[in-house]
Amino acid sequence: MTITQHGDLSTSLSVDDSVATAGQAVGFHMTVNYSGDLPITAAHLLGYLPWQSGVSALTCSTINASNCVVDSRFGGLDVTFDVQPGGSVTVDGVVHALAGEETNYFGVGTYGPNSLSEPNTINNFARTTLIESLFRNGFD
């Protein structure tokens, strides 16, 4: 393995609602930013979704990035992309809440190719909590 790039991938994650009821549509936004000395190819964003209810309204928007491919066949997200230094990739979508656990989690992680030297990887992961309300008005 040869190191050819030096840089940092970082993630951020947000959801449209912090409380949801069963059947409610919940929007999510997962972003990867890249700072580095050279472009990288075949970077990954892995998205964990709390429910296996299917994903809709999936979009991948890029800034100084290309070849964004989103795979949502297995209940989560596996996104591959190429990115220039200073670039970013954002995946937006909607998932429907299912009845179940009171506390649910969305998560996102990212990693680059083996040729990327990334000394600090703690910012490669993000997670947020979504509380499932028993009542439609959110009053518990």
Image (cartoon, rainbow, N blue to C red):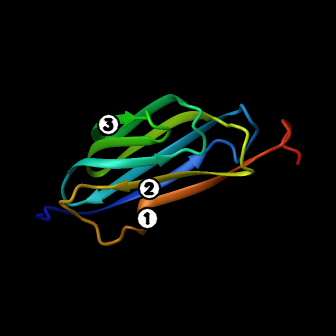
The correct choice, above or below, for 129 with respect to 22 in the image is below
The residue sitting at 11% across, 64% down in the picture is 2
Asked which secondary structure carries label 1, the reply is helix
* Earlier-in-chain disc, 1 versus 3: 3
In the rendered image, residue 41, in percent from the top left (x then y), is placed at 21, 47
Q: Nearer the viewer, residue 2 or 34?
A: 2
**Crowding near the residue tagged with mark 3, few <14, some 14–19, many ≥20 C-alpha atoms within 10 Å:** many
Marks 3 and 1: in contact by CB < 8 Å? Answer: no
Marks 2 and 1: in contact by CB < 8 Å? Answer: yes
The correct choice, above or below, for 130 with respect to 135 in the image is below
Asked which secondary structure carries label 2, the reply is strand
- Residue type, mark 1 in image: Asn
* Earlier-in-chain disc, 1 versus 2: 2
Q: Which residue is mark 1?
A: 123
Q: Quadrant of residue 51?
A: top right
In the rendered image, residue 107, in percent from the top left (x then y), is placed at 52, 52
Q: Which residue is mark 3?
A: 68
Q: Which residue is mark 2?
A: 11
In the rendered image, residue 75, in percent from the top left (x then y), is placed at 50, 38
In the rendered image, residue 27, in percent from the top left (x then y), is placed at 60, 37
Give me the C-alpha separation between circle 1 and circle 2.
6 Å
